[in-house]
Image (cartoon, rainbow, N blue to C red):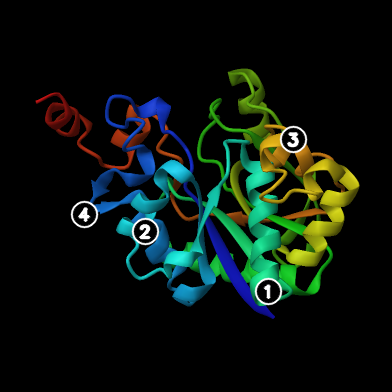
Amino acid sequence: MTRAAVILAGGAGTRLRPLSSDENPKQFLKLFDGKSLLQLTWDRIARLLLAERIFVSTNVQYADKCREHLPAMPPANVLAEPARRNTAPAIALCTFEIERRIGECTVSFLASDHFIANEGEFVRVLDRAHAFAETHEELVTIGIEPTEPNTGYGYLEIGETLEHDVLRVRAFKEKPDLATAEEFLRAGNYAWNGGMFVWRSDVFRRALEAAAPEIARVSDATYEEMPSISIDYALMEKTRHVATLRGDFGWSDVGSFDALRKVGVDVDSHLARVSS
């Protein structure tokens, strides 16, 4: 079955102001080896998929900037949102458009602005997630192996084994307080929700029609009428058919200055350049 990937690159990066700005949000910042987070995300996925099978979802404001950062990507593979409506309408529109272009396929959705230390392991897990999604009626999310009781992330409660390293997701948990996060860590059957998804296009369509039929009717013409809602709230928390692979590849959403420092970024020097 054909595989495709979508890089979600429409965020405004408000938590990293003044490093980021409305004109140059987090995904375009060149914090690692002279490459932007968007470029590093592309490079990881390009180890698994051909350039014509990698797409970028962004808003109209950043469409040209995405093309500038990713010259190897076919220009038509930038899928620009007609309006800001959060991830559920954007992901639905992308899934349906890619299916229209290349037929039934598995599609992965990955953030443009995360850091991953072990890229080889990430590619292995993503490959496995696609392989599982191809042959199962499940929506797959990659859960991140937690390294600390972090209160800044949502969590996945993990259940029984479905197939070797693939597990059932029992529930999505909101960002916990510290005591609850510590309890999750002790329990051992929780993973961070990193917002990485893989599914077969037809499986996604059926699940969305059941959980959020109004979003399943999304199109360019109806986009501005869509509710502004995340894919977790609109779909993933409502369906019983969610599976996960636990990823242990040095992931961080680098969503704060402290998180940037933890992965080796000299934040002070970058801030000094911005203020000069």
In the rendered image, which residue does mark 3 sit on? 233
In the picture as drawn, the residue positioned furthest to the left comes out as: 276
Task: Give the crowd class for mark 3: few <14, some 14-19, many >=20 residues within 10 Å.
Answer: some
How far apart are the alpha carbons under marks 3 and 1? Answer: 26 Å
In the picture as drawn, the residue positioned furthest to the front comes out as: 221
Q: Is residue 189 above or below residue 160?
A: above
Labels 3, 4: front one: 3
Amino acid type indicated by mark 2: Arg
Whole-percent x, y for residue 202 in the image: 80, 66
Task: Give the crowd class for mark 4: few <14, some 14-19, many >=20 residues within 10 Å.
Answer: few
How far apart are the alpha carbons under marks 3 and 4? Answer: 36 Å
Labels 2, 4: front one: 2
Relative to residue 182, is residue 59 drawn left or right? left
Whole-percent x, y for residue 261 in the image: 29, 34
Q: State which quadrant residue 244 falls in.
A: bottom right
Whole-percent x, y for residue 114 in the image: 43, 46
Q: State which quadrant residue 243 falls in.
A: bottom right
In the picture as drawn, the residue positioned furthest to the right comes out as: 210
Q: Is residue 74 above or below residue 158?
A: below
In the rendered image, which residue does mark 4 sit on? 33
How far apart are the alpha carbons under marks 2 and 1? Answer: 29 Å
